[in-house]
Amino acid sequence: MTRAWTAGRVAVLLGLTALGLLTGLAGWAVVDLWLPAGVALALLALFGLFLGGRIATGTGIGVGAAAAGWFLAYVALGVPRPEGDFLLSSSGIGMYAYLLGGTVAAVMCATLRSPFDRPVSAAPPAR
């Protein structure tokens, strides 16, 4: 099922991309500073964002917009600066868990089916 690309829908998708960017920035800092609990906190925030994007748009494209912003922040912060160091540490198991866990959360939310996604039948239920 395709939906029309209205100005409101484009605005929601751009908002989700911006929220994904901010969540990625915050998640990177939390994972790096509070390693054991930071990974869980960052992944919970990502899951909430992706699920909210799925609910707000009704399709997986909302998850894709939020995931694009998150991944853009992840890549931008992982590039070394001209001085030769990173903005925040990009090594260690926490960053790999954050990347893998965020990807799993995005795929879970994008492939999620709600009861409203099923086709509606006009036939009365069988007895």
Image (cartoon, rainbow, N blue to C red):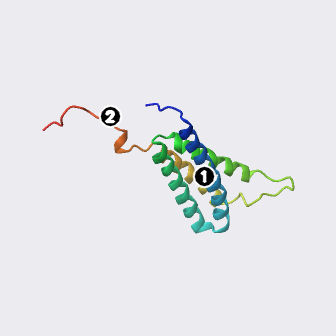
Compare residues 34 and 72 and report the one nearer the observer: 72
Number of residues whose C-alpha sits closer than 10 Å to that of mark 1, classed few (under 14), some (14–19) or many (20 or more): many
Residue 40 quadrant:
bottom right
SS of the residue under disc 2? loop
Q: Amino acid at mark 1?
A: Leu
The label shown at residue 119 is 2
Left or right of residue 56, residue 102 in this image: right
The CA distance from mark 2 to mark 1 is 32 Å
The residue located at (59%, 47%) in the rendering is 15
Residue 50, image x, y percentages = 52, 50
- As helix, strand or loop, the secondary structure at mark 1 comes to helix
Q: Nearer the viewer, residue 73 or 39?
A: 73
Q: Residue furthest front?
A: 7
Q: Quadrant of residue 8?
A: top right
Horizontal side of 14 relative to 76 (left or right) equals left
Q: Which residue is mark 1?
A: 19
Q: Residue at x 15, y 36 (%)?
A: 126
Name the outermost residue toward the right.
83
Q: Residue at x 55, y 55 (%)?
A: 46
Residue 10, located in which quarter of the rendered image?
Answer: top right
Inspect the image, locate mark 2, and give the three-letter code of the amino acid beneath it: Pro
Residue at 61% across / 56% down in the picture?
23
Q: Position of residue 42 (x, y in %)?
A: 58, 60
Q: Quadrant of the N terminus?
A: top left
Residue 94 x/y as whole percent: 63, 60
Sequence-wise, the earlier of marks 2 and 1 is 1
* Residue 51: numbered disc: none
In x, y percent, where is residue 6? 54, 35
* Residue 88 in the image: above or below residue 99: below
- Say how many tags the image has: 2
Label 2, residues with CA under 10 Å away: few <14, some 14-19, many ≥20? few
Quadrant location of the C terminus?
top left
